[in-house]
Image: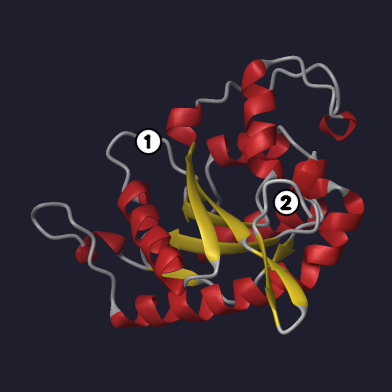
Amino acid sequence: MLEGRISYRITGREYFTSKLLIVIGSTRPGRVGLPVAQWIYERATEYGSWDVEIADLVEINLPFMDEPSHPRLHQYTHDHTKAWSERVAHADALLFVTPEYNFGFSAPLKNALDYLFNEWQYKPVAFVSYGGVSGGVRAVQMLKQVVTTLKMVPLYESVQIPFVQQYFDDSRAFHPSEAAEQAAHDMLVELARWTSALQPLRAGSGASES
């Protein structure tokens, strides 16, 4: 059994609970990424197939890359890298909540990706993006180039939230549209399928046990 997974049997087959790590890609004061991430966290938890965790890059507070060795060697010297490695290694799937900055995604998110290599491999990744008229789709397109280099599998299904400020009330509570709710459901269904399909590759590579 994979370390850290809870197994159970149905009609003779063994299954594993899957760990979903939601990464908040914005660290800007006043960001809306936190309430958006809390919303998708609730939906993923309600879906019932996940052990869900949020990784907030504000709290993780990684400095700009300061490891002397290439991440693929897994020779980490700093405690912050070791802690980040452990969190990502134990995830079976990733979900990035990302804004769009100048047609791209944020520097803290790129930095967090660059810290690791093996820990990302053979894991599906989904995207919830937000912004202005484009809803963050250009940030996601750039992210896909990066995650495929890390041997992750980006999903086609995603959630885009254009003109995101209109979905907040006076108390700053987030109220997504029906379209966003449906997109989230479709994305989570597909993410669960890919998580299961890629599990043999993760087990064979040791990517989830680093």
Q: Quarter holding the C terminus?
A: top right
Residue at numbered disc 1: 28
161 sits to left or right of 54: left
Secondary structure beneath dot 2 equals helix
Examine the image and state in which quarter residue 167 appears: bottom left
For the question of whether residue 11 can be seen, the reply is yes
Question: In this figure, which residue is indicated by the disc labeled 2?
Answer: 146
Which element is circle 1 on? loop
Picture coordinates of residue 54, whole percent (x, y): 47, 47
Residue 30, by quadrant, is top left
Residue 44 is situated, as x and y percent measured from the top left of the image, at: 46, 66
In the foreground, 105 or 126:
126
Image position of 91 with respect to 58: above or below: below
Q: Is residue 24 left or right of residue 39?
A: right
Q: Which amino acid does label 2 sit on?
A: Val
Of residues 59 and 10, the one nearer the viewer is 10
Q: Residue sitting at 76 percent across and 48 percent down?
A: 208
Q: Where's the N terminus, which quadrant?
A: bottom right
Against 19, residue 3 (above or below) is above
Residue reaching furthest to the left: 170
Q: Where's residue 185, x and y in %?
A: 46, 78
Task: Tell me which residue sits at (28%, 76%) in the image.
Answer: 177
Q: Where is residue 126 in the image (x, y as percent from the top left)?
A: 59, 64
First in sequence, mark 2 or 1: give its number: 1
Residue shown at 53%/73% (left/top)? 188
Residue nearest the viewer, comparing 45 with 122: 45
Labels in figure, total: 2
Q: How is the image coloured?
A: secondary structure
Within 10 Å of disc 2 (Cα), the crowding (few <14, some 14-19, many 20+) is some
